[in-house]
Each structure stands twice: as C-alpha cells, then as structure tokens.
Image (cartoon, rainbow, N blue to C red):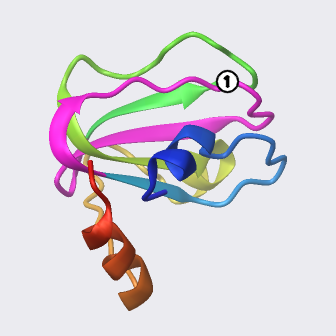
Amino acid sequence: ALTHEEQARGLMFQKNPTVMTFLYPDFNIRKFWMHNTPADLAICFLKNNSIVSICHGKPFDESHIGPNIKTNKVIEFPLSLAKELNISKKTKISIHLDFDSFKKYCSIKY
C-alpha cells in the first residue's frame, strides 16, 4: 500500500487477505482500525526492519489500535499466517519492492 488511497483501503472487504505492507516516509505514531475488514489480522508496527509492536486486528473492530511508538512501516498479516510463521518482536523483516513499485513509491508526494 503505497498511495494514500491504497493505505486508506488496506485489507478492507477481503475475506482471505494477503500480506499488505505500508511504507511511510517518516516516523510517526500510527493507529489502524478494522473498519469493513472481515478477517483477523496481526498488525506489525516497525521501526525500519524491527518489529516494535504486534496488535491483533479483530474483524470489523473500529477502535484505533497501535503502539504509542513512532514507526515508519506497518505490515498486516492474516492472523493465522503470522502464527504459522511464528512472527514475533524478535522477527527481522526486510521489504523488497519490485521496480515498478519502487518508482511509484519515489514519485508519491507526501
């Protein structure tokens, strides 16, 4: 999710979601909600490539969730996949963009 529109939609309406990554140009406190999201999610908040917090996104929950820590990346996993992969705060994550996504990311005006 690189554009504001993609980030606003996130994994809404997806009964069988995939992994979604949110990249931000700055460090800020980020809060997510599960409006129109029918699947349980593990929402991982990162400082660079280190997970600083993992929150459980519950289906259709409209409360804002996230740590009071400044982060620059967020990754949403289906909760079952996060459990299967044993995702934890100790997990190091490296994000790689294909060339078209990289060009799109570089052209976004924040």
* Percent x, y of residue 67: 30, 21
Residue 45 colored magenta?
yes
Task: Tell whether 86 sits left or right of 59.
Answer: left
Task: Tell whether 21 sits left or right of 95.
Answer: right
Dot 1: what SS? Answer: loop
- Magenta residue span: 24-51
- The front one of 56 and 37 is 37
- Quadrant position of residue 3: bottom left
Which amino acid type is marked by label 1?
A: Lys
Residue 44 colored magenta?
yes
* Percent x, y of residue 54: 40, 34
Q: Residue furthest right?
A: 15
Judge the density around disc 1: few (<14), some (14-19), many (≥20) Cα neighbours within 10 Å. some
Q: Establish if 1 lies above or below 66.
A: below
Q: Which residue is mark 1?
A: 58
Picture residue at 68% right of the left edge, 16% below the top: 61
